[in-house]
Image (spheres, grey):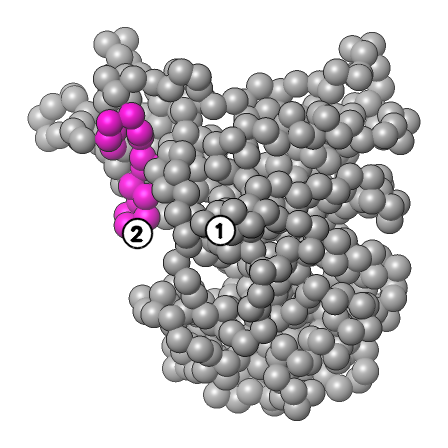
Amino acid sequence: MKRIWPASIHPAVIAVVFCGCYCLAQKPVDRSAIDSYLGPYIRTGNFSGQVLIERDKKVVFQKVYGFADREHQVLNTSATRFHIASMSMQYTAAAILRLVDKGTISLDLPVGTLVPKIPGAEKITIRDLLTEQSGLPDINDLPDYNEVLQHHQTPASLVAKISGRPLLFEPGSKFLHEEHSAYNLLALIVEKETSLSFAAALHALIFKPLHLSNTGADDDSSTSGRTMAKGYQPDGVSGLKPATQIHWSGKTGNASIFTTASDHARWVDALLADRLLKPASREAIFDESQRVGYGWFRRHQKRFNQTTYSMNGRAPGFASFLLYLPQDKTTVVVFSNIYSSATTNIGYDLAALALGLPYERFRPSDPAPSASELQTCAGAFKFGPDFYQPNAEVIIRANERELSMGWPSGDVSPLIPTGRDHFIDRSYWEDFSIERDAAGHPTAIVYGEFRGNAVTRKGSNQSVVFLP
């Protein structure tokens, strides 16, 4: 994708922007530029939902796009509620911190004093759960996890799924991956300490005090009505289909929250203004020394010349993204009822657009590659141990006018063409390109920052090619 500058910025001031002067940031947000930027995502079925940009606690841009229900032609509105997937962790963490503030529990309390029948209960602390350093085996990795989502669950039933399984590492020693089970366990602790269901406890501890009237925890009983967005998932390179229906109670604590962009921006404002938590708890959330924890990612980004606070989420039919830039007092919220990680790219680019910084457009190929051109991309490619799925061998297949990548897990990612030998993985919104030898044969693929080499047959220097 090509990096561009907003039309309003003269090249002479580019160096000033990069030097950290944000005098241009106070200009009004160009609404037409945002619509133009989002257009390709919407036309290709990769975004549908709500966008909100707030600066110094004032909304400077808010708009909705697409359908809440495509089959019945119901449009999204500012009141449409979206499931926000892993961004839900922020609310679970805040509920726990409210209990810490009340003196009910402490961050260094071993969880075995509250829930003894879990692996490592005597070693794992509340803090370890919040910072996703518990070492607990993850429920999302269980072979029957999809079946778990087809039935009503409770925090207790979810925690029971990992009972008897060994720890993956010593608690508190490292962050390995997103710990969904840790937040299932935190939800159970909230229930035990409040004597309320998790949904009722969050209402009492967070939603009611902050007047978040469009926000709730989905326990399979409270999301009926036309204000709830229906989720969709990619179908090939350009199509959409209804997402697989799940019981959201199967994601209690880690991905069961539904809300609106307005409510979520109000939620961030409350955290920043110390309206919900005591200073020590608020400082724990925004501690720059912790890269991950409390439902946030923190890292210094050269693009914005500051430490950024963000979170994203994906769950069947939905994707979400939140970005907070403390130096610019800017918050960006992007909710979509299409299962695609495009929301993360959209959120960062909209922040850059609002601040007068460079951003990237999504430019799908027009015309699309021919079937014969796509066929030259097919093959098998091997990645190293540091890849998302270690040592994965992925299969690139051409089918009529579409290219896709098959993962060892069985998942299939449609590949959107953006140029000759350049694509975007529609599922994970990752850049994908093909390297070729002098004869035009694929020798490797580059997926994000990773490189996978073409698999060759024994005794041959030709890569394996898969016909449609």
Amino acid on which the number 1 mark rests in the picture: His
Where disc 1 sits, the SS reads: loop
Q: Residue at x 81, y 12 (%)?
A: 10
The image quadrant that residue 82 belongs to is: bottom right
**What is the count of numbered marks?**
2
The image quadrant that residue 376 belongs to is: top left
* Residue lying farthest to the left in this orientation: 459
Q: Main secondary structure of the magenta part?
A: strand
Q: Badge 1 local density, few (<14 within 10 Å), some, or many (20+)? A: few
Where disc 2 sits, the SS reads: loop
- Residue 202 lies, with reference to residue 3, above or below; the image says below
Quarter that holds the N terminus: top right
Amino acid on which the number 2 mark rests in the picture: Ser
Question: Which residue has dot 1 on it?
Answer: 72
Question: Which residue has dot 2 on it?
Answer: 409
Query: Can residue 413 be found in the magenta stretch?
Result: yes
Q: Residue at x 69, y 56 (%)?
A: 79
Side of 463 relative to 310 (left or right): left
Across and down, in percent, residue 299 comes to 68, 45
Across and down, in percent, residue 146 comes to 36, 65
Question: Which mark lies nearer to you, 2 or 1?
Answer: 1
Query: Can residue 54 be found in the magenta stretch?
Result: no
Q: Which residues are magenta?
A: 397-414
Which callout, 2 or 1, points at the residue further toward the start of the chain? 1
Side of 76 relative to 57 (left or right): left
- Residue 242 lies, with reference to residue 32, above or below; the image says below
- 124 or 62, nearer to the observer: 62
